[in-house]
Image: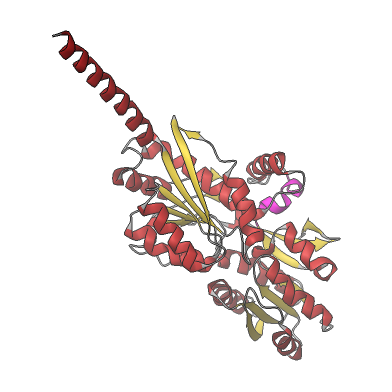
Amino acid sequence: MKLVLRWISTAVFVASVSSVVSSQAFADVKIGVTLSATGPAASLGIPEKNTIALLPKEIAGQKMQYIVLDDATDSTQAVKNARKLTSEDHVDALIGSTVVPNSLAMIDVASETSTPMISMAAAATIVEPMDAKRAWVFKTPQNDILMATAIAQHMSNHGVKSVAFIGFSDAYGESWFKEFTKAADLAKIKLVANERFARNDASVTGQVLKVVSQNPDAVLIAGAGTPAALPQKTLKERGYKGKIYQTHGVANNDFLRVCGKDCEGTFLPAGPLLVAAQLPDSNPVKKSALTYKQAYEGANGAGSVSTFGGHAWDAGLLLQRAIPIALKKGQPGSQAFREALRAALESTQDLPGSHGIFNMSANDHSGLDQRARVMVEIVGGQWKLAKD
């Protein structure tokens, strides 16, 4: 009899321990991250990776687990990472990727597995047009059209009548050409050239010679990270004297380092984070932008903050707002939780981020407005808030 009681007691104890362990593992909220920490977009992906390390380890009493993979700026690898994270690691949400082609390639995985995805890339095509697949996808960077209209307006204000375009020969460049063409047309600015280059090209002399031959008042370079410095340096080498504009894809210190003196006087639209300390106190994004800046530089050193890291930070803020709501509908690891998380993200309202104020809806999974942009000029190798 004592032997039977001892066996029952042991069995109950083992079952209790197993239940606790299982419950604890089940309680973790898993976030899968794929970003471009190596390859042509490494100057964007590294600050994103550094920022993921700053995200909260617990939300609403639930332990957070971030599983971070490098896709090396390769869309095929981004898809492999997304499939591993969803099918093997069973993550509750995806953050990534860094660049447009990778993010577009991941949409099918997010949709097929009913996993909410927050992209850190800019193109509107990531979340538009809204359909059954994109219902699972959100993004934190500003839409290209928001930034394109800022450039076109600045050009118009400064007497630019003609502009040449040179951009990446991928989805980023194509999206920018499409949106800037609309903005230029509204501003009555003539587009006189459309040239492309690859992120890993070593020379763009041929494209630049075609651009210069049109003698445009300005040139818009639609690239991201350090590869966008190549056309600018080549334009200077060929004696181009007109105005040069870049996109918000170059808003980091690595671009300044690589481009050097050839970028003096360049204009670009950027998130308020880039010049947060220069913003007036009345700017609604200043406080939230400085919060991230202080957190990042506290961990990585003064002057190290990057706008691209801000996109990862904002993804984290969206999840911090959504997770407590989703927990009321389901447990982490379940389809009910993922569905509730998607719905909570879509319902985000008045959330101050490092780049703007997020107001999501069923038809808008970007959620940013004009408060998410400022015009910036490169002066003395530094970012300076432009007057208009």
Percent coordinates x, y for residue 301 in the rendering: 75, 43
Q: Is residue 104 magenta?
A: no
Q: Which residues are magenta?
A: 271-280
- Residue 135 in view: no
Instruction: Report the magenta stretch's main SS.
Output: helix
Q: Is residue 34 left or right of residue 345?
A: right
- Residue that extends furthest to the top in the rendered view of this protein: 2
Choose top left, top right, bottom left or bottom right for residue 81.
bottom left
Q: Residue at x 60, y 52 (%)?
A: 48
Q: Is residue 327 left or right of residue 278?
A: left
Q: Give the vertical position of 200 relative to 124 (above or below).
A: below
Choose top left, top right, bottom left or bottom right for residue 168.
bottom right
Percent coordinates x, y for residue 293 in the rendering: 69, 44
Q: Is residue 11 left or right of residue 123?
A: left
Q: Residue at x 62, y 47 (%)?
A: 50
The colour scheme is secondary structure
- Residue that extends furthest to the front in the rendered view of this protein: 3
Q: Give the vertical position of 2 relative to 299 (above or below).
A: above
